[in-house]
Image: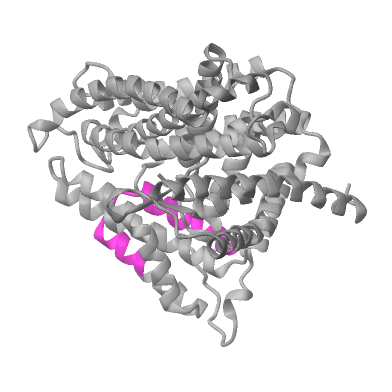
Amino acid sequence: MNEHRHNPVAGEYRHRVPTAVKAISALAMVVILVTCTPSLRLYAGAAFALVVCALLSRLPIIPILKRLLLVEPFVLCVAVLSLLQPNGLHIFGLLVARTTLCVFTLVLLSSAASPAELIDLLRRLRVPSLMVTTLALMHRYLYVLQEESRRMRFARQSRTFTPGRRRIWRNLATVVAQLFIRAQSRSERIYAAMCARGWQ
Amino acid sequence: MHIPDGILNGRTCATAGVLSAAALGWAVRQTRRELPPRKIPLMGLASAFVFAAMMLNFPVAGGTSGHMVGGVLCSVLLGPSAAVLVITTVLIVQCLLFADGGLLALGANIFNMAVVCSVGGYYIYRLVYRFLPNPRGRLAAVAFAGWASTVVAAIVCAGELAFSGTIAWPVAFSAMASVHMLIGIGEAVITTLVILAVSQTRPDLLDYTAAVSIDAKPKLDFLIFGLLISLGLALFVSPFACPWPDGLDRTAEVLGFGASAHRVMAAPIPDYLFPGIKSATIATSAAGLVGTLIAFALAVVLSRILLPTHSKTASAAPGEAQGE
């Protein structure tokens, strides 16, 4: 495992490891887990390395566990399907162990690396600039649009009665349509702002 | 349907990765050539929109709730190439920032949701719209495409699971297809309602050639995306759907993976634990065929309910009559 081998130093250690190192070691971990012949020793080693990384990074434990649990239902759904075939229990165990380790790796990566750094890494990896611009803009306006949809919901709730089941669908569709229309006109304003600041 | 890492094997991830890289490369090329600079921010905003729309839950029977995927919605509003770019961006952000969907499985996820679901759904929509060229036909086409694309994407996902040797095809196919035939109804209804609402407020946005201004070479688009989707279906689905007893062995043999294929997951799958499963595949296929017909009929009925007859005068300019 070429997980972070730097000396643990007190303080915000996770910020000093370059994002490229974090991303590449996470990728290496996932590749090893997916391609190597499954064995108890491999999974134990991987789990140990991940726990060490989690402790070294000094990230809060509870949010990481919560995010791990969020992904787990899908894993269990697929794993339960594997019980329906011969030797099912064996495959079930392997599947749950391997997938949980992979998800743990990704949760660590996404908690330890900042989104802006990850997007910058993609830019340096020669991902087409249209993709990178789209990613950067999406990340910038992700929370803006979520907030906007929340505001629209509150506005509706404060003006109308609690809707019945049929109205909920209709209302939701209106919210989504409005969200798209607003996103579209916002994109035009953003373009004007980008030009005003000397873009391209 | 975000597949995490560890469920698909390396071979499946690589195959799906190559397919979706080709589709993405083509989509970026087309978008870059055809997209006017003032629409570049729209790509980012549309990605954020799809993400925000996924966060909105609607109630389903029995206290559970679902959310929309928005593949068909996106491709109807923006066109196929831009939709591939937008959905891929959403998947990358979900993977890297929220650990939803795997890093190695990203190729498979992009193939299922950006290529099969949204582009495949778009061509289903165009096909139905061509035969019913009026506002109602558009709604029926959207509803049917929303349902069919969800089911087809689920079947491809089941094919990938079986191709990896993780889950036997009959189990994966019956479970994924039957569940998504139900989920698809929700996706179809919500997509149709959104398209109707957009057409009532901003009918100009529905004409994606005006919104994104991609007018050149739609036939070439169809050719490339159609080729990639059929390649994916041929690789992941057809080996299992054919009458040979074990499709996996045969593909492995043909592709030369025979020696290494079964080492990782030692499951040659001789027979199934439950005797009903083998017949369940046939039952699911039959239900799928009947379901497709019913879904199409329902889509037409839905469009009739949503656009009553008295608005027929608006057939030239969809939504003008209800635009008040």
Name the foreground residue: B50 vs A87. Answer: B50
- Report whether B242 appears left or right of A128: left
Answer yes or no: is residue B18 visible.
no
**Residue at image coords 53%, 20%:** B137
- Report whether B44 appears left or right of B105: right
| Residues in magenta, as a range | A21-47
Total numbered labels placed on residues in the image: 0
Query: In the rendered view, would you say B294 is above or below B55?
Result: above
Dominant SS of magenta comes to helix
Name the foreground residue: B132 vs B219. Answer: B132
Q: Quadrant of the C terminus of chain B?
A: top right
- Report whether B32 appears left or right of B228: right
x and y percentages locating residue A57 in the rendered image: 51, 77
Where, by quadrant of the figure, is residue B321 drawn? top right
x and y percentages locating residue A123 in the rendered image: 71, 51
**Residue at image coords 75%, 51%:** A186
Q: Quadrant of the N terminus of chain B?
A: top left
- Report whether B99 appears left or right of A150: left
x and y percentages locating residue B143 in the rendered image: 47, 29
